[in-house]
Amino acid sequence: MSRFLSSAYRDMEAYVPGEQPRDRRYVKLNTNESPFPPSPAVVAAYDAEKGNVNLYSDPTAKALTEAAAEVYGRESRRLGGGDITPDMVIAGNGSDEILAFCVLAFFRDGGAAFPRIGYGFYPVFCNLFGVPFDEIPMKGEYEVDLHALAASSRNVMIANPNAQTGVYLPISDIEAIVSANKNRIVLVDEAYCDFGGESAVSLLERYDNLIVVTTLSKSRQLAGGRIGLAFSSREIVCDLNKIRYSFNPYNLDRAAIAAGAAALLDGEYFDRTRNAVAAERERLKERLSSLGFAVSPSLANFVLARREGISGEELYKQLKARGVLVRYLGGDLSDYVRITVGSADECDVLIEAVKEIIKEKNI
Ligand SMILES: *Cc1c(COP(=O)(O)O)cnc(C)c1O
């Protein structure tokens, strides 16, 4: 640390992203990326922008917000909600950027509340922007305290499915939180919703205090493209744009805008790949359970797992030594590892490594 750092940040702890090691090739099951390559339409869209990078990107990201409004509007109507128009959508440089904008725009006065087990970035953003927050203790191993969240006077951030357990709350539970107090914001982070949940976008028609955030990183093969989206009322999107234009108007580059739109519009590839991941997840759960693991009832593209006889940290290290990278989260979750659902081949390698460790340790 230099002696010049602002005093406000001297004690701040930054978010620690999952490892992206370059020392050897790993079976990489630690950061919830897709095991599939991007769709051919996405690759073509990226390529088509290569020759245009001398020009700034579109600050309104029109192609992307229009595609998002079309795709999520259809989903909203299917679930009994209303239309979504492009002015109800904002695009971010990853959904992390949108989460930051939301905390900055809406949470500074009322503070934030979120479940204690959740996405590690929420407290980090609150600390960065000086927002007070309450971490609501879990009710059981995997259960969030809905009642406490609904009763909190603070603005709520919640990942659905949960970012560490993968547990999904039905829309009726989300609605209970949103409707409990209409004078605060409820932000639902749906990074993992495409692997088995239903989006809360259909509630937007009835609640003007709801923000639904999603990302193209997990279910649309674009983690490295950095594309996030949020859906809300026109007024809230307008407020978020005020923050965005005050910070980085060209927050998405040309290729990201084009590729993001292409990914959203390639529904066939999206359905095929997300269904394959969901099927592989169920196979992984069964195999881990039969090897003596307690596995979270996840609807995401990962599972949280623990096993008698070995700590989360040791399991992580033993797997890494065998070329398989999983996420060790520590803290409240030091008994566990979080394992991304990889391809069938990658999951096979993981299971073989696990069997070897169990045998070697005689547990
Ligand atoms: C991965 C993830 C994000 C961030 O996604 P990006 O769009 O890649 O920034 C946000 N929220 C949750 C819960 C996530 O797991």
Image (cartoon, rainbow, N blue to C red):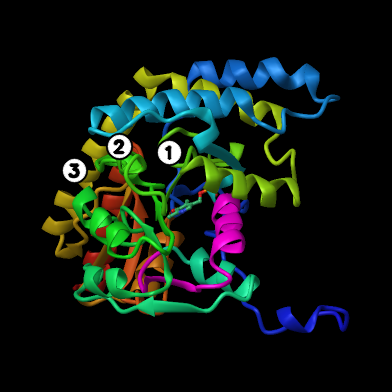
Residue at label 1? 34
Closer to the observer: label 2 or label 3?
2
| Mark 2 crowd level (few <14, some 14–19, many ≥20, 10 Å Cα) | many
Secondary structure under badge 2? Answer: helix
Would residue 289 be counted in the magenta stretch? no
Q: State which region is magenta.
A: 96-118
Q: State the image coordinates of residue 298 (x, y, percent, origin top left).
A: 24, 53
Q: State the image coordinates of residue 318 (x, y, percent, origin top left).
A: 39, 66
**Residue nearer the viewer, 20 or 159:** 159
Who's the residue at 37% across and 28% down the image? Answer: 83
Which mark is drawn over residue 283?
3
Q: Is residue 260 visible?
A: no
Q: Earlier in the sequence, mark 1 or mark 2?
A: 1
* Residue 339 sits above or below residue 36 on the image: below
Residue at label 2? 277
| Mark 3 crowd level (few <14, some 14–19, many ≥20, 10 Å Cα) | some
- Corner quadrant of residue 64: top right
Q: Earlier in the sequence, mark 1 or mark 3?
A: 1
Would residue 103 be counted in the magenta stretch? yes
User: Which amino acid is tagged 3?
Assistant: Arg
User: Which amino acid is tagged 1?
Assistant: Ser
Marks 1 and 2 in Cβ contact (< 8 Å):
yes
In what quadrant of the picture does the N terminus appear?
bottom right
User: Which amino acid is tagged 2?
Assistant: Val
Q: CA distance from mark 2 to mark 3?
A: 10 Å
Secondary structure under badge 1? Answer: loop
Closer to the observer: label 1 or label 3?
1
Q: Is residue 66 left or right of residue 248?
A: left
| Mark 1 crowd level (few <14, some 14–19, many ≥20, 10 Å Cα) | many
